[in-house]
Image: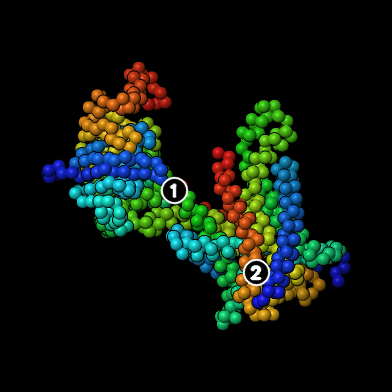
Amino acid sequence: MNSHLRFDLNYILRHLPDFVPAISMALQILALASVIAMIWGTILALARLGRGPIYWAATGYIELFRNTPLLVQIYFAFFGLPVFGIFLSSFTTGVLAIAAQHGAFFAEILRGTIQSIQTQQREAGLALGMMPNQTMRYVILPQALRNAIPASGNQVVLLLQDTALVSTIGVYEITKTAHSLAERSAASFEMFVAIGVIYLIISGLMSVILRGIEGTCRVVR
Amino acid sequence: MDLLPPEKAISVKNLHKSFGDLHVLKGIDLDIHRGEVVVLIGSSGSGKTTLLRCLNFLAEYEQGQIHIDEKLMWYRDVECLQKRPIKKIAHDRAAIGMVFQSFNLFPHRTVLENIILGPTKIKPIRVPKPEATEEALALLDRVGLLEKADAYPNTLSGGQQQRVAIARALAMGPKVMLFDEVTSALDPELVGEVLNVMRQLARDGMTMVVVTHEIHFALDAADKVLYLDQGKIAEQGPPEQVLFSPQSSHLKDFLKRFEEMTLLNQRGTSTGGQTRT
Amino acid sequence: MNYTDLLYLFDAASKTMMMAIIAIVMSTFVGVIGGVASVLGGRLVEMLVLAAVYILRGIPILVQLFLVYFGLPFFGFRVSPYTVAIIAISLHMGALVVEVVRGALVALPKQQSESGLALGMTPLMLMIEVLAPQALRAALPPYVSLIPITIKATSLASVISIWELTLASKEIANQTLATFEVFGAAFAIYFVICFPFTWFGRRLEQRYTGYWQ
């Protein structure tokens, strides 16, 4: 029981070292899931350019993952995959579930940028004698990917927050570590204030870095 | 340049094109000989741009035949029932150069890269990079922009971008060049530099089909002027005949606009900077 | 999974909807006040609101949930987990609403205010007759897209043992091991609840693109 309003700062400071591996774990999840999600999102976006079953499959996937909570997807993977005989670590399950959802978001971002590259660019490529897939490869995609960088950067920062959800399946990233420390002591509130600050610092740093990257990859026109 | 007899470079028969319910081209018959410069004029909606875009199949027509060098283009049959495979279409487009009203340069590549992209990557030609670069630089020189080779399109003026666009189209070694109102989006001072490049191309013997409002270009460089009205060729003939002795009342009205311009110029009033040399 | 299980899930879904509705109402309330205040209330208020939004958006919802869960007792308040969840979700969503409101207000072209004032309107009349209706129309599409986000956020309440759709499906899945069917049903239910709003939001977006010309 906490004596009224005494904020145990000591407890936080004493346990800061425990958070180093936690932060590392969270960043690993972030990096891995982001890369997979971006690749997967690009594939999905390209799939939506075609027609027929591939288009509908991709669209269906994106709508499904946009309209269902990430937590349910994580639980589904965690409890469901073993039933099918697939046994993955919590870490892998978490990364895949996050990547599966954020892939849908990246696909939407790319769809927007691809659409915004005017049809005129495509026609210029065709007039030179390019095949449609060549126009995509040399003219539209390079521009679309470059234009997608700012929005993708924001998406990655959001992904950081979703990494907290894998604490529910036992991955010792930041939130889980705080939770277990909180259970073992009376300083629960302090713990979560501490990780609140940690998350703010990390996302703040990420935003700064991303702004720097945006600046160097100067978006042409 | 070419000492071959003037065969029909392009031959269009009974061309029809609709956009949904809108019947834009209502039976076009047209012959263009090698080395000829043909200018298409008409009010907006008359179908002149559509006709141009049908020539390289950027607009897919439903009826009619287009022959280039005596070969049936874009469809396997004369009834337009079966399109040729996309590879063949792309291949054929490479032999036709097109310059657009909005230049459409690739903003993510330098001027030089814009020009060599076609020859180095597109099948019919596929030239190795050093060779393509050499030819590209020669073309840039021809249009007067050699010093801009490493610049990005967004640093160039409209007239400069359009000249690069012409060089880009020429890099593919086309037999025919199509020009779609290429000066309409330019500030008046920049129109001249582009038209000069086109005049030089005409003098060098290129077969050109030009949609334009620049009447004096038609007078200088065209061998034949076609006036399109509501999807049909209403009048055609040598420039002096069509422009100075128009037969139809529509054409007379259409040309009146330009008359007013010339009168204003003669009176020495510049309306919005529109002075013609 | 059988029929009773399915009814169990539907029951849980109704609890999800209840939570979502309350959270939407409260977050709208908080967000509109915060957003309007930040635009009209002067530099200090604006900075306070923006700081709050930054914090609420920079911390994962799950962590905010725990912060409220452990924080209220810390300050001497004892509330039910249900209330905790509502407060946490409403705060987080409120921050998103503030951003939508600010976005709509800030995007109003100056000419609108100037022409109104030139006609002789008072600032209040200007706000009511000219600015507010247009701001509402601009804010509507992004606001609608916040609704499915709120609904999905209620799933986190399961972590503090509040009985809603996610917790219910987890329960059944662990009991019957028919994980595919159970979570499949949960997916379907969430989808059916959320999709109309997503789709409607997209329609509104298309209708109002280029609204300001």
Report x, y in % for residue B137.
28, 48
Report x, y in % for residue A149.
52, 56
Q: For the point 33% across and 40% down, which residue is it?
A: B25
Please determine whether, in this image, residue C194 is positioned above or below residue B60. below
Say which of A158 and A116 sits in front.
A116
Q: Chain of mark 1?
A: A
Residue designated by label 1: A118
Q: Chain of mark 2?
A: C
Three-letter amino acid code at disc 1? Gln
Identify the element where label 2 is drawn: helix
Q: For the point 64% across and 74% down, which residue is it?
A: C182
- State left or right for residue C72 relative to residue A155: right
Q: Quadrant of residue C7?
A: bottom right
Which residue, as the protein is rendered here, is positioned at the far bottom?
A: A85
Three-letter amino acid code at disc 2? Ala
Q: For the point 74% across and 64% down, which residue is it?
A: C15
- Mark linked to residue C186: 2
Q: Is residue C175 visible?
A: yes
For the image, the number of numbered tags is 2
Say which of B191 and B233 sits in front.
B233
- State left or right for residue A202 relative to residue A51: right
